[in-house]
Image (cartoon, rainbow, N blue to C red):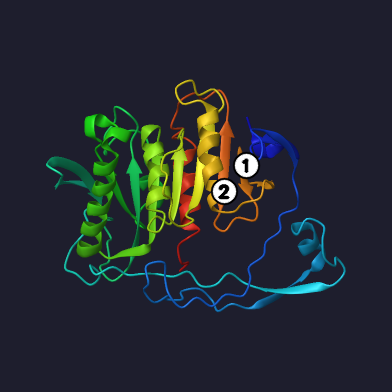
Amino acid sequence: MNLAANSTMTTHSTGTRRQRLQYLPILVFAFACEPTRGRHGGPIAPLRSEPGTTEFNAVAAYVQDGGTGDPTGSITATQTPPIAVQASEGCGGDVDGSGEFETRTVVIDEFERTYHILVPDSYDPDRAYPVVFRWHGKGGDGLRGGLGIEYSSDEDAIVVGADGLDKQWSMANETNDLALFDAMLRVLSSEYCIDEEAIFAYGFSSGAGFTNLLACERGDVVRASAAIAGFERGTDCLGTPAAWMLHDEDDARIPLERGFDALEVRLAANACTNQTVPEGESCVRYQGCIEPVVWCQTSDRGHSIQSDFAPPVVWEFFADFLPQP
């Protein structure tokens, strides 16, 4: 099922479970901004071109504002401000990458936890790399499960896969699992050159639930998340990370409604409207968000990681938050 193929579609909003929405033309606004500090308090390193100004017809602002104001004049907006890079303390160190997953252990509250780090073979200790944490579904582990984003990120990211206790990410182990994430990130920051402004979470099923938990309770650390067949988790949310979500209408294990619940949380946190525009195959992007929120919905795939579709699209979504060469 291709949600983006029709001009009128059934989608989800914060007001009702499903309603008919008429697509509007894509309206892109980037307002003048001159940030001086990164998300973690460090200095911003501008790696994109300096902002310039572009004139837009005020009809766009009139539609975006719900039909108020003057639709006859013009407004001035600026390009997207430079993307910040926060290099970790591990930059400049004497370490190499192997291009293969290497297994590590750490003790969290008397539990020995296992995780696996893939550092690109071409690793450069003077380049700050994004980090993708991938979270397997129930019964899987940090090395398997079909998430496979490393084939799309290639040499451009450090990828980490952790093993869940009892091969899952359950609410019973929530405190330990969050502490594991914190511990892994500390190791990466101290040993490798990573971009602390580019920490991503990507998970399937119970791992998608944990991904949503991280987006909530570590939302001041996670830059963007991607949850496949996920559900709502987390109560004390921080920050407004970007979110990409995929759910199949015919998922019998984690029903579509539970995916909508998770979507609703992110739409509210990121102050999105219920207006959407098509984005690629089967996906829509919500408008007016503080940070982007993309919802993808398929049919006839069931409870599936959709490895033929998700990994490259997820990496493309994450890459939007990286400085361009």
Who comes first in sequence, dot 1 or dot 2?
1
Q: Which mark is residue 208?
A: none
Q: Quadrant of the N terminus?
A: top right
In the visual, does 292 lie left or right of 41?
right
Find numbered disc 1 in the image and state the secondary structure of the residue it sits on. Answer: loop
76 relative to 212, above or below: below
Q: In terms of depth relative to the viewer, which is nearer, 84 or 145?
A: 84
Q: Which mark is residue 14?
A: 1
Dot 2 surroundings within 10 Å: few (below 14), some, or many (20 or more)? Answer: some
* Residue drawn at the location 22% of the way across and 45% of the way down: 116
x%, y% of residue 262?
50, 39
In the visual, does 215 lie left or right of 28?
left
193 relative to 20, above or below: below
Q: Which amino acid, by three-letter code, is at mark 1?
A: Thr
Q: Which mark is residue 268?
A: 2
x%, y% of residue 163?
24, 38
* Residue drawn at the location 30% of the way across and 40% of the way down: 174
x%, y% of residue 292?
56, 54
* Residue drawn at the location 35% of the way across and 64% of the way down: 195
Q: Does residue 147 show up? A: no
Q: Does residue 258 show up? A: yes
Q: Are marks 1 and 2 in contact (CB under 8 Å)?
A: yes
Spatial distance from mark 1 to mark 2, Cα to Cα? 7 Å
Dot 1 surroundings within 10 Å: few (below 14), some, or many (20 or more)? Answer: some
In the image, farthest residue toward the front: 236
| Number of marks drawn | 2
Q: In terms of depth relative to the viewer, which is nearer, 269 or 280?
A: 269
Q: Which amino acid, by three-letter code, is at mark 2?
A: Ala
In the visual, does 106 lie left or right of 297?
left
